[in-house]
Image: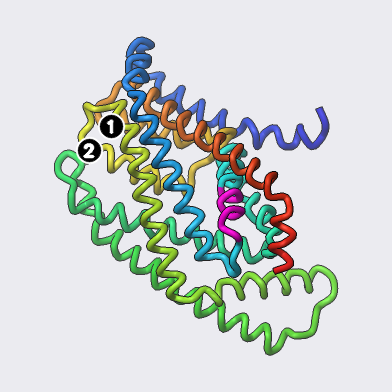
């Protein structure tokens, strides 16, 4: 085992071990029934798989459309779709969300600087948080007992959404002002690492500053559509495997998990603390430990299979279009 592998080992197995420990702690005080686990998994009808596949395809198309809107320069649609599929493959497979950093490398071949891609990813993450918070706030309008307590959070969450939206607009305006200051007073290149930081910051802020309000509105709209498609995917899985739960409970669990995904610790293949939280939520709404674990693991497994297939398709598309990255840079 090389020294580099030894250094990376905690990052590879740490999140998985933490998630497994949390699951063991949760299941330790609950009765686990192997047959109940198998019966829950068997509830997934074959026809549902085709529906889930269609929803996954729709979500990847939506991701590509949003990235096309937020990027500072156009990328051919076919290659951008392949890049999105590959990015999703790495982001879901590698631990600690390190796979997200594959997107700057993939788009570098399309003539887009890493700093510009990071600015786009920063914008996308902010839009994801904004839309998720908005959906949780709006969900309070439809909740009744025993999950109606979320209504008490409706007004604070709506206020947070308004603050996030205002912060996004202010950040864009501030980025333009700072970029203008760089252009006016920082024309001379700086030596060494200082010059690299200044150039990177100028490119990052310039990408944010050139994001117009119509493009921002388009990004918000596409984020909302993508989020609804992702919720439909998760709802279909939960409704099929746990029909005894009310639609309100399922919706609330999904929205809570969407919020938690911004802060969860992710291991190999996406396994980590999110599964423990999902089991805890399902048990809180009446599922047994074996049923909750079956829903959590099968949902993760289905999503991972689709992501792996998408990664293979993305790799194949880029291999077929080998001349594409060079022509994109030249144009």
Q: What residue do we see at 28% from left, 43% from top?
A: 252
Labels 2 and 1: the sequence-earlier one? 1
CA distance for labels 2 and 1 = 8 Å
Which is more toward the observer, 28 or 231? Answer: 231
Q: Please name the residue that numbered disc 1 is placed on.
A: 239
Which is more toward the observer, 282 or 66? Answer: 66
- Verify whether residue 78 appears in magenta: yes
Asked if the residue at tag 1 contacts the one at tag 2, i.e. Cβ–Cβ closer than 8 Å, the answer is: yes
* Image spot of residue 220 (x, y percent): 40, 63
Q: Quadrant of the N terminus?
A: top right
- Verify whether residue 206 appears in magenta: no
Specify the principal SS of the magenta part: helix
Q: Please name the residue that numbered disc 2 is placed on.
A: 247
Q: Which residue is situated farthest in the right direction here? A: 191
Q: Which residue is situated farthest in the top direction here? A: 35
Q: Is residue 139 left or right of residue 119?
A: left
Q: Quadrant of the C terminus?
A: bottom right
* Image spot of residue 95 (x, y percent): 61, 39
Describe the element under mark 1 as helix, strand or loop.
helix
Q: What residue do we see at 45% from left, 30% from top?
A: 302
Describe the element under mark 2 as helix, strand or loop.
helix
Magenta span? 76-84
Q: What residue do we see at 29% from left, 28% from top?
A: 240
């Amino acid at each position: 085992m090389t020294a580099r592998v030894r250094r990376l080992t905690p990052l590879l197995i740490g999140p998985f071990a933490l998630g497994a420990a949390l699951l063991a702690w949760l299941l330790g005080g609950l009765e686990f029934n192997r047959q109940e686990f198998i019966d829950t998994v068997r509830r997934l009808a074959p026809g549902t798989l085709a529906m889930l596949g269609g929803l996954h395809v729709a979500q990847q198309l939506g991701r590509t459309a949003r990235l096309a809107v937020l990027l500072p320069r156009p990328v051919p649609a076919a290659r951008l779709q392949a890049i999105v599929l590959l990015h999703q493959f790495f982001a879901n497979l590698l631990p600690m969300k390190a796979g997200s950093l594959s997107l700057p490398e993939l788009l570098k071949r399309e003539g887009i600087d890493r700093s510009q891609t990071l600015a786009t990813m920063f914008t996308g993450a902010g839009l994801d948080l904004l839309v998720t918070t908005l959906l949780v706030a709006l969900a309070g309008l439809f909740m009744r007992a025993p999950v109606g307590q979320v209504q008490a959070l409706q007004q604070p969450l709506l206020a947070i959404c308004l603050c996030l939206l205002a912060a996004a607009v202010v950040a864009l305006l501030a980025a333009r002002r700072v970029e203008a200051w760089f252009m006016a007073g920082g024309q001379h290149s700086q030596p060494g690492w200082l010059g690299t930081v200044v150039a990177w910051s100028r490119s990052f802020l310039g990408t944010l500053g050139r994001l117009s309000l119509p493009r921002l509105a388009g990004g918000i709209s596409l984020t909302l559509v993508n989020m609804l498609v992702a919720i439909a995917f998760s709802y279909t899985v939960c409704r099929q495997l746990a029909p005894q739960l009310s639609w309100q409970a399922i919706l609330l669990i999904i929205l809570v998990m969407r919020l938690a995904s911004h802060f969860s610790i992710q291991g190999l293949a996406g396994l980590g603390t999110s599964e423990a939280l999902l089991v805890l939520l399902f048990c809180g709404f009446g599922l047994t430990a074996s049923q909750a674990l079956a829903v959590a693991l099968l949902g993760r497994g289905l999503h991972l299979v689709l992501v792996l297939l998408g990664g293979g398709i993305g790799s194949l598309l880029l291999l077929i279009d080998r001349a594409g990255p060079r022509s994109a840079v030249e144009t």
